[in-house]
Amino acid sequence: MADAKVIPFDDDRSRGATGKGAARRRGQGGGGRRSGEPGAAREVPRLPVQQPVPEPGAGEAQAEAGERPGWERRVAGGLAFLRRRLTGEYEVDEFGYDEELTDQVLMSLLRPVAEKYFRVEVKGVENIPAQGGALIVSNHSGTLPLDGLMLQVAVHDNHPAGRHLRLLAADLVFMLPVVNELARKAGHTLACAEDAQRLLEGGELVGVMPEGFKGLGKPFGERYKLQRFGRGGFVSTALRAGTPIVPCSIVGAEEIYPMVGNAKTLARVLGFPYFPITPTFPWLGPLGAVPLPTKWTIQFGEPIPTDGYPPEAAEDPMLMFNLTDHVREQIQHTLYKLLVQRRSVFF
């Protein structure tokens, strides 16, 4: 089918212009007699120029014609994306991160969950540097690590520079089939100091949740009470790279799977750190794995600079302990403040 020719709305033909000349006077010429004299020419009255009446449905047809190029571009972009996937003509970095796949597919799938289901509200995103490396340190909760994925969407969609967050994940993530490949493609990497330092020195945003499985699998009665932040390895990494530490507090994830029990024997058999029992799982089967639609708030605190310390500071255990405790206290204080401010778990 041939494409319809679209006439721009500012084209001269669509203005209804009357032209330069006016209607000539009948008999006007060499004599030029005054009005009222015998034989004076009578002036022909000017009639208003009528605009053409559009045919029914013409506006809709023009709108469709104007939208068609946009749809064509999107379809062409999608086909080009599929072609690159099939032919292998796409790039990944040394960690397996596929930026194109993350932007066009993974973020597109996670964005409706963040915006419509959890209705994530983001605060303090201006505290994340516009460029260069930075370490975002957050609390961890929710039985399943959905908070890490929502944090990734929050940074990318709300930061003015559209920055990508590279999350440090536990060994278990890279041992699971399918999950392993998707995590690598989404920019996640093993939670080790060497990988984190290379990313930070390369100017990347790196996200870490020091509570680990202790925070993710804590009972519902201990919600929003931060667990121990390990041995402060993330502080040592930031000191070596000279990058700021940005505390982050997430409210809302604790209630998506209220963990009321832990089947430890079954967890050991399956090789999991815990096996959660919630009011809906495993009683409702797969339906019980659907998270509750809680209202989330993610707040980024003021960055803590580390570039003022000497290189040997990364080996000072007392300094690492103090900085780790300072970051932890900031996150805990913000959690309590957000909990007081929220009206309801779901609204």
Image (spheres, rainbow, N blue to C red):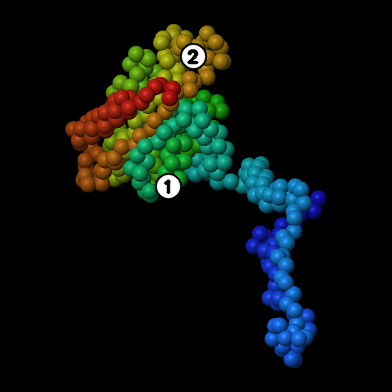
Find residue 270 and name its label: 2
Q: Quadrant of residue 35?
A: bottom right
Q: Is residue 292 left or right of residue 198?
A: right
State the residue lying farthest toward the bottom: 30
Label 2 with label 1: CB-CB less than 8 Å: no
Residue 196 in percent (x, y) is at 37, 38
In this orientation, does residue 193 appear? no
Q: Quadrant of residue 84?
A: top right
Residue placed most toward the observer, 340 or 122: 340
N-term mark: 2 or 1? 1
Residue 247 in percent (x, y) is at 31, 35
Q: Quadrant of residue 258?
A: top left
Q: Is residue 30 above or below residue 85?
A: below
Instruction: Find disc 1 in the rendering and name its residue.
Output: 160
Residue placed most toward the observer, 304 or 7: 7
How far apart in space, not on screen, are marks 2 and 1 (Cα)? 43 Å
Q: Amino acid at mark 1?
A: Pro
Find residue 17 and name its label: none
State the residue lying farthest toward the left: 318
Residue 64 in percent (x, y) is at 70, 48
- Disc 1 crowd rating (10 Å Cα; few below 14, some 14-19, many 20+) is few
Q: Is residue 322 left or right of residue 143?
A: left
Q: Is residue 107 above or below residue 11?
A: above
The residue depicted at 67 percent of the width and 47 percent of the height is: 71
Q: Amino acid at mark 2?
A: Leu
Q: Is residue 32 left or right of residue 241?
A: right
